[in-house]
Amino acid sequence: MKRFIFTIIFAIATIGSAIGQNFRVRVVNQLQMPISYAVITIEGAPRAVTDIDGVVEIDFRRIRPEYRLAAHAAGYRSAEREVGQEGMTSGSIEFVLPMIEGVVADTDVDRTSDQARALFEAAVGESTAMDFNCTLTSAFSFEYMKHKASGELTVENLVDSKELEYFREKGWCHLPIDIRMNEGSSQSVIHKLDESIHYALSELNFAIAAIGHNRHFYKYRPDYSLLGQSTDGTKQYYRVSFPMLATKATQIVATVDLTLHQLTSIDILINDRNTSIIKHITSDLQYIYPTKKSKIPALCPTALRYTYHTRYADLMLQMSNVVISPSDKKR
């Protein structure tokens, strides 16, 4: 009987101790270098972002032995594991994230954000976001909750339109999208498809603006680091992080072609705590001059993939053969 009572008291003390402390999560790469601003999800929902040392503490009351935690960081492959009894006992868990294939890690951990930014700007020069009057056409494939659609779309972006004045502050400010679905497509996803096209282009536009010529428009200073370079030394990969903008944390990996001195692709990871959604956007880029007199090119997609995952639904939008035609049209 005494042993039973002692066991109960010990269990209560252990639980009380757990409630009074935080659960520690550390995220590093294969070289044991900390990964800053990694997104930590609990049971698929984003809950925290690591600090500059790759560490974050989570309220122990959110943790259970059977819960699955995952770490996500742009430029790295995600990892997931169950907390387990060992994690509950130690009060901590560590994730080791492998780098994306074909990248040799930069080991200069003493380089500051400003120094990395200077290297980036020297490599690519000036560019601006897709913030000009134009028409975008694209083939697309779309899937949402196992409902599929494919076809073509056309949409106009009019930055000087009075009826779009409010939306101009929100990113890609387009007129209604003309969507032409192929035979056999599910018409039930038309609204979700329209919404996804808007968000995909808006988030891409934001990321490009954040690292491009008009980045001073944003009051939040991003953190720059040189993620690494390709095995043949022809490309560099820069990681640009916004730890938290309102309810969102954004990570960007920009691929720089050192021969062309241009950005050739971008990888964007967005943690939206407000909606408990992690969004992922990848896009190949091309340089377009909005007008004949333009001196600074705009970075525009030639192909784009947008996905998100929640506990309840998966979404995938693929845009291919993207053609962007600058326009002098005003409204």
Image (spheres, rainbow, N blue to C red):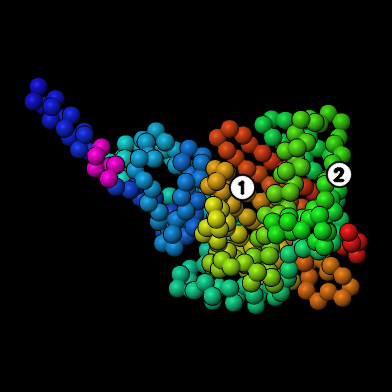
**Viewer-side residue, 170 vs 120:** 170
Instruction: Read off the magenta span.
Output: 15-20
| Alpha carbon separation for disc pair 2 and 1 | 24 Å
List x then y, in percent, for residue 323: 85, 55
- Picture residue at 54% right of the left edge, 43% below the top: 276
Where disc 1 sits, the SS reads: strand
User: Main structural element of the magenta stretch: helix, strand or loop?
Assistant: helix
**Viewer-side residue, 232 vs 288:** 288
Hey, which residue is sitting farthest top in the picture?
Answer: 1
Q: Determine whether, in the image, residue 141 is placed left or right of residue 253.
A: right
Residue 137 appears anywhere in the view: yes
List x then y, in percent, for residue 57: 37, 51
Q: Amino acid at mark 2?
A: Asp
Q: Amino acid at mark 1?
A: Lys
Say whether residue 18 is magenta: yes
List x then y, in percent, for residue 198: 74, 49
Q: Determine whether, in the image, residue 28 is placed left or right of residue 293.
A: left
**Viewer-side residue, 205 vs 299:** 205
- Picture residue at 83% right of the left edge, 46% below the top: 177
Q: Determine whether, in the image, residue 100 is placed left or right of residue 49.
A: right
Instruction: Give the residue at mark 1.
Output: 279
- Picture residue at 80% right of the left edge, 31% below the top: 187
Instruction: Give the residue at mark 2.
Output: 178
Task: Please identify the quarter of the rendering in which residue 32 is found.
Answer: bottom left
Say whether residue 195 is magenta: no
